[in-house]
Amino acid sequence: MEVLSPLISGHSVSVSGRAARTGNRVSSRAPCTSHMLKINCTFFGSPVSSACCGQGTKIRRSYQPGQAFAIDAAQGFDYESIRLHELQMKNRLKVGIVGFGNFGQFLAQRIVKQGHTVLAHSRSDYGAIARKLGVTYFRDADDFCEEHPEVVILCTSILSTESVLASLPIQRLKRNTLFVDVLSVKEFPRNLFLQVLPSEFDVLCTHPMFGPESGRGSWAGLPLVYDKVRIRDGPRTERCRKFLNIFESEGCRMVEMTCEEHDVHAAGSQFITHTVGRVLGSLGLESTPINTKGYESLLRLVENTYSDSFDLYYGLFLYNKNATEELQNLERAFDTVKSQLFDKLHSILRQQMLMKSEDSKEPNLLKSAPPTVKTLLLSDNKNTAAPAVKGIDVNINVTSNSKSVPEVLSAKAFQAKAESEIS
């Protein structure tokens, strides 16, 4: 055993031999000339106090359990960096992205940042963008598949998924390739993968519940839904874990559920969100000087949904069997709200007319069959359609002075006349 002289006096010392690693007494070949020499040492950040005298050296250490505090002198100065590189290489995946549009680029940027190798293929030429992101781009699908990516992610639109998958020369891929989709519907790609892909391929259905806008800064707390549809045991399970770790390491909230469960929840949340966003976007809402927080939320909703392509929205409707029912529920809910408004108006008008009839000197006021609330709400423009009103119709006739011909009043005229008579 040997205690080497400090590299920098009073700060660092290198000790070789088993005794140094176990903390046993280490003898010195030459006794120290000083009566007591105290050396403060640091091994990988752990403070080490060393005291030596003529009889030998005692090393007292304080360190956390399992923490390395000494390196064999035979190890190179770059030992740690080499070990770290080996660990990174062990966890590195070769990921291929098919469909390098906005969402494909969005995913590629994070995957490259984590040290994985990313390949990309798309019908359009994204070569320049891919080079900036550190992605190897292939215009030819055969060249892409011959690179044998371990994981292939389909980042296409819902409507084009089937045709894009059919165009891939999957026979050039390895038979243990993992196929992943990131579509907003799940039953459709699951059934498509199981029908088209060879049985040797693994299948993982995922849905990042965020996009380039909502996930622009951080992915922390954003949900990632996944279903391990067909994952073989052994190394394939580990590969699936590595891929999911891409999202987990970014702070995503990992939610495992079946494709059927996902589509039920998505129809009642994502599809309704996009529907309301498109309705509000069609209204042309704009910011005002007196915006409330609620109105600001509506503007953000329009910003996050209305700018998406209509094909995305149509795909949410067409390929989710639960979307039609949710759309009908939304229509019924809107009709209910309208009915509540007009029923309330019906009640107020009826009360006003009854009060007037008690004080009126005209006994004929309530004898004739009056127009309904539906008629009362008609504007002066005859082409304006009146809304349907549920409830009991209140009939009121206002006769003209010339003849007993009923006069149909507009809503504004009726209100003005009623106020003048009541006053």
Image (cartoon, grey):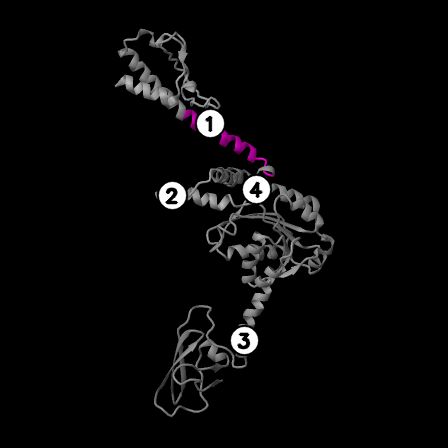
The residue singled out by tag 1 in the image is 335
- Residue 116 falls left or right of residue 251: right
Tag 4: residue type?
Phe
Q: Nearer the viewer, mark 3 or mark 1?
A: 1
Give the total of numbered labels: 4
Q: Nearer the viewer, mark 1 or mark 4?
A: 4
Q: Which residue is mark 2?
A: 288
Give the prevailing secondary structure in the magenta stretch.
helix
Mark 1 and 4 residues: CB-CB less than 8 Å, in contact? Answer: no
Measure the C-alpha gap from mark 2 to mark 4: 27 Å
Contact between marks 2 and 3 (CB within 8 A): the answer is no
Give the residue at x 36% y 19%.
Answer: 414
Q: Quadrant of residue 104?
A: bottom right
| Quadrant location of the C terminus in the rendered image | top left
Q: Quadrant of residue 176?
A: bottom right
**Label 1's element?**
helix
Q: Is residue 335 on the magenta stretch?
A: yes
Residue on which disc 4 sits: 310
Q: Earlier in the sequence, mark 2 or mark 4?
A: 2
Foreground of the two, 104 or 84: 104
The answer to which of marks 2 and 3 sits earlier in the sequence is 3
Where residue 79 is drawn, which disc sits there? 3
